[in-house]
Amino acid sequence: MKTKKIKSSRIIGKIVDAFFWLIVILVSLTCLFPFVHVFAVSISDEAYVVANKVVLIPKGFNLTAYQKIFADSSIIRSLLVTVLITVLFTVIGMFLTISAAYALSRKELKGAKLMTFLILFTMYFAAGMIPDYLLIQNLHMLDTIWSLILPLCFAPFNLLIMKNNFSASIPESLVEAAVVDGAGHFKILTRIVVPLSKPIIATIALFYAVGRWNAYQDALFYIKQRVDLRPLQLKLYYLVVSSQESFQAEGGNTGVLTNPEVLKAACIIFATVPIVIVYPFVQKYFVQGTMVGAVKG
Amino acid sequence: MKKINNIEKYAKVKRKGSTKLYLKMTWQLYALMFLPILFIIIFKFIPYYGLTIAFQDYKVAKGFGGSEWVGFEVFQKIFAKRDFLPAVRNTLLLNVLDLIFGFPMPIILALILNEIRCKWFKKVSQTLMYLPHFLSWVIIGALGYQLFSLSNGVINTLITNMGSSPIPFLQENTWWLITYVLIGVWQTMGWGTIIYLASITNVSPELYEAAKIDGANRWQSCLHVTLPCIRSTIIILLIMNLGKMMQGSFERIMALSNAKATEYVTTIPVLVYRWGIQSGKFSEATALGLFQSIIGLILVVAADRVAKKIGEEGLI
């Protein structure tokens, strides 16, 4: 009697396990399916795609869409613009964040509390879209890459994470010993704190880089006349989402062109691949960073 | 000899000795703060001054100084506008729907993932589930149009193959709303599990053992051990989300909006964009943005107070 009960509960356990596996598999597949489909479309023949014949397996293997993308200098240019602004944004942002995080984590700094409050206050109460826009206009930064770099490259949230990490992980005695040895704070920061904080520095740098790579709102506002300065995401927005723009024809003649589905799909894959390439590396740091940020922030 | 000197100096500074010595040993800290503070002043505080145009009849030609002050007239004007109430309603509606459908999903998913013992399977599925978090809204919107399009979207192809008529996922207002929320849930559910999984790993294994000895099955130990242990995480995240009720994701809406389904698209940020950047009505747009920021700030502060009151660590 008892063994029977145990046996049946074991079977139920197995069924429950199978059910959980099924749910997880389904959820995972919904995250994978869109990419497989769009990728299949991007390397298929237009005729099959128009006839709705392509679901997950490409039909009529064809790479002309990718050839067209690489022949379209404006798309390649957008990619280069994005790479440039992402690098500058991350470097400047990290410089500011590390400097401020270290200084604010030191007790000798008078007014550290007030400064922290003032910086964090901007996180909860921002002036908003229009005052920001008018500022960029008055600084004559509209239609320059600086409008996409300087306003957002110092993020209070990242500062908070880094400052808390410095306070928690750099032993006070180590800094004091260095001070006693006559080292200035520049030296302490570059020789002791930075080498000891590589994981958090990598994490925050990736926060900055991925955030900048993916954003397009500010580009939509600030890059208007200079079409050649459009970052990749904005380019994709005009090409695929709002379809306000056509792909350049080969040889540069601008005839009447529709945006064929295959070309759109190839464009999506083109914009996704850079992220997918760095993703396995980035993921670990992002998970860690999210947990650090969740403690306070 | 030099070292002893330094120690003495340092001890003096610590005892709040002479200002000169203090400055000599700490000026580099202030130097480090110079550029960050400059950035905050230019890009965060100067725009606060720009908020004054919400109380002016701002004319681009006259600038900040020359425009006429009108008090709260601009606010009265925007509250009376036809688009104002729908924008507030849509902002709240989209956030409430996100909360109802998007908030429980990561919790459920985390509880399920926690039950899975096979390590490689867990890792592969987590990697896949986290992926949407790393993609921009443009890419997600573009994927959405590829999948949900009326005539040649793959989902509608499958639906018509089964004999039903195609569904206007992005072309009809109610369906647009459903699709918008679904895509949001899809994008956030995997990533949202991280915090819950972290707090589940903090649950003491002894509790599970004790529950097992008392004869609890998996469902019971999940209900009476795991859930109570992650309760405070759930509450704090819920409060944080409630504090964000007035915010709107501009990028998400822009990436999914189209000319056919416009009913729910007009949220406050979209209206600010249309009035301000597209039509040049800077005073009205600024006032609307300020209205949103102030209510947003009140909500965040209230959320913080509530969190502290129930004994959680606050947000601010």
Image (cartoon, rainbow, N blue to C red):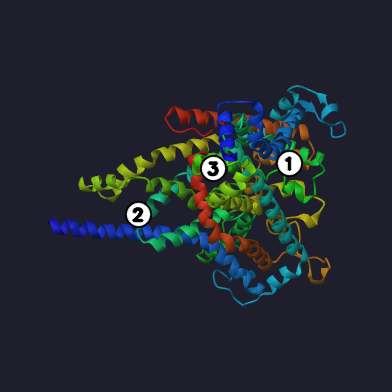
Locate residue A4, reporting x and y percent. 15, 59
Name the foreground residue: B147 vs A205: A205
Image quadrant for the C terminus of chain B?
A: top right
Instruction: Tell me the kind of residue under disc 3.
Output: Phe
The crowding category of the residue bearing disc 2, from other C-alpha atoms within 10 Å (few below 14, some 14 to 19, many at least 20), is: some
Q: Residue at x 72, y 57 (%)?
A: A84
Residues at discs 3 and 2 both on one chain: no
First in sequence, mark 1 or 2: give its number. 2
| Residue B302 as seen in the image, left or right of residue A231 | left
Q: Is residue A84 visible from the viewing direction of this image?
A: yes
Instruction: Tell me the kind of residue under disc 1.
Output: Arg
1 vs 2, front mark: 2
Determine whether label 1 and label 2 are within 8 Å by CB. Answer: no
Name the foreground residue: B254 vs A143: A143
3 vs 2, front mark: 3
Q: Which labelled disc corresponds to residue B115? A: 2
Pinpoint the chain carrying mark 2. B
Q: Residue furthest bottom?
A: A60
Q: Which residue is mark 3?
A: A166
Give the structural element (helix, strand or loop) at label 2. Answer: helix
Determine whether label 1 and label 3 are within 8 Å by CB. Answer: no
Residues at discs 1 and 2 both on one chain: yes
Picture layout, residue B14 above or below residue A198 = above
